[in-house]
Image (spheres, rainbow, N blue to C red):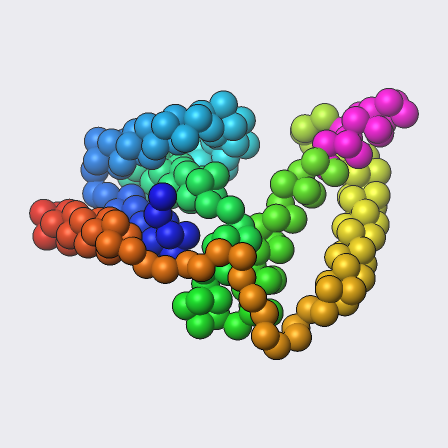
Amino acid sequence: MLDPRTKLVLALLGATAVALAARITTAASLLGAGVILIAAAKSLKSFLKWLAMVLPMAVFFGLVTGLGAGKSAGMLAAIKLIGVTAVFFAFFITTAADELGNALIRWGLPFEAAFVFTAALQFVPVIGRKTRRVIEAQRCRGIPLEPGWRAIRYWPALFIPLVLQSFQLAEEMAEAMAARGFGRPGRSFTRDFKMRARDWLALFLAAGALAAFIIYRL
């Protein structure tokens, strides 16, 4: 099991490799490697659901790029976008937000900044669940919130309850933080995060592979 900091650096190196890919086959190969990693983590089904949301944005980005730089450049840009986001998808499904925050604190990141970072990561799935519940509730009331331009006039029926619930959730979190003495010195950790030999080995191999890839491209 790798340290969360190691996983973060590996994700950054992987995203850099995808961004530097100059050929469609290279970018597609890196994307395939990311999909294999996600499948090994038994999260392929979640990835496919996520891909259904990201794919329209990738297609739009590819079309815009293709209009200015050609068809091949557009396809490459779309694959790169999916590849970079797939790398970070693999990172977040294999790394708990609180563990990453505590490990970053060990690296010298202020506790308040680490808490904001981890809280933002943990808020994403919570807000997603609340969004689905609001949509289902409004559909039961006969308010169509299907994707498309026709539903724009009904969007306030989604966003207003969602914003109110978000403020309520933030207030509850603030009260819980105050009750637990947020910001007091002398914080302890349930797990001691240390960079071990396997972490340094993984970083060395990944950095070497990225350096070789850059040299090959040059």
Q: Tell me what residue is drawn at x 51 percent, y 46 percent.
A: 96
**141 vs 110, nearest the viewer:** 110
The residue under the point 54% across, 57% down is 190
User: Hey, which quadrant is residue 80 in on the image?
Assistant: top left
Percent across and percent down for residue 183 are: 66, 73
Residue 48 lies, in percent from the top left, at 48, 25
In the foreground, 94 or 216: 94
Query: Who's the residue at 78% across and 44% down the image?
Result: 162
Left or right of 155, for residue 113: left
Q: Position of residue 77 (x, y in %)?
A: 34, 40
Query: Horizontal and vertical percent for residue 95?
Result: 46, 45
Q: Is residue 35 visible?
A: no
- Quarter holding the N terminus is top left
Splitting the image into 4 quarters, where does residue 65 fall? top left
Q: Main secondary structure of the magenta part?
A: helix
Q: Is residue 99 above or below residue 33?
A: below
Residue 17 seen: yes
Residue 99 versus residue 157: which sits nearer the camera?
Answer: 99
The residue stretch that appears in magenta: 131-145
Residue drawn at x 45%, y 63% is 104
